[in-house]
Image (cartoon, rainbow, N blue to C red):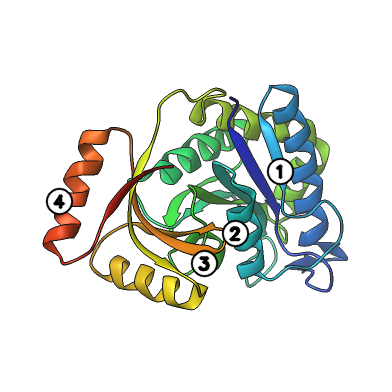
Amino acid sequence: MAATIILDAGHGGYDNGASYQGRKEKDDTLRVALAVGQKLEDAGYNVLYTRTTDRYDSPIEKARIANRSGADYFISFHRNSGMNPNTYNGTQALVYAADTEAARIGEEINQELVDFGFNDLGVVERPGLVVLRRTQMPAVLMELGFINNDMDNQMFDQRFDEMVNAIVTGVERAIPLNPSQKQYGVQVGLFRYESNAQYLREQLESQGYFAAVRWEDPYYAVIVGRESTLEDAKALQDQLRQDGYDTLIVTL
């Protein structure tokens, strides 16, 4: 079964995002998301979107859309903006935490965009961003150049297809088309109300665990980890039990 990727066009509706000389971030991000999505579909991936029109959803709703979709990966597209025009330029990948699957995906996409021609601003941790913190799958937010930099805009407009191809190549390098390996997590809570699940998730993260909330109708499950082997999941389960949690190994 092919991997499912949900693409998020940043902003939308009354939320224009950053703007510069009449140019709106929400329009650039939608154009990229649709173009990247089409090429990924052509390559065989299952592709979903948080939006395909000029519609507003809050960041938390975007995360909920992604979580309800059951997608394996989340990629959000944005344009950066500096305090003064033509001061900063370049591409950047934002992730919840370093040394994660999301960071590896961000590195691959970012490197392809650097090879394409953007300045390299690296992979940066941004745990405060809702679409990275509240998504239950590996999530990356790509800043595709600065909207108030003429050089970045020139590359974005005049070499758009090349830029899209670079993003797609990065995705293909990082995400196998047909992942055959199971992944395991450890469930530590099941709640009727999302607020209770999020409270436990934050508690776990304060203890150094990677945790996510997954909707399992009609409950919200709190899942720790994303392990590639059952042995690693069992080791994580033992650690959680030592910390006083009731646990259940689940397949992701």
Residue 106 located left or right of residue 154: left
Q: Secondary structure at mark 3?
A: loop
Q: Is the N terminus in the top left, top right, bottom left or bottom right quadrant?
A: top right
Task: Give the Cα separation between the discs numbered 3 and 2.
Answer: 21 Å
SS assignment at label 1: strand
- Which element is circle 2 on? loop
The amino acid pointed to by label 2 is Tyr
Residue 170 pos. (x, y %): 56, 31
- State the mark number for residue 129: 3
CA gap, disc 4 and disc 1: 36 Å
Q: Amino acid at mark 1?
A: Leu
Along the line of sight, the residue nearer the viewer: 171 or 136: 136
Check the image and name the residue furthest to the front: 218
**Badge nearest the viewer, 2 or 4:** 4
Whole-number angstrom distance, CA of label 2 to CA of label 4? 47 Å
Camera-nearest label, 1 or 3: 1
Q: Are marks 4 and 3 in contact (CB under 8 Å)?
A: no
Q: Nearer the viewer, residue 191 or 78?
A: 191
Can you say whether 186 is above or below 114 in the image? below
Q: Which residue is mark 2?
A: 88
Which is closer to the viewer, label 3 or label 2? 3
Q: What residue is shown at x 46% (from left), y 23% (from top)?
A: 180
Q: Report which residue position mark 1 lands on.
A: 48
Q: Residue at x 78, y 60 (%)?
A: 26
Q: Which label is found at residue 238?
A: 4
Residue placed most toward the observer, 36 or 81: 36
Give the amino acid at mark 3: Leu
Give the CA distance from mark 4 to mark 3.
30 Å
Label 4 neighbour load within 10 Å: few <14, some 14-19, many 20+: some
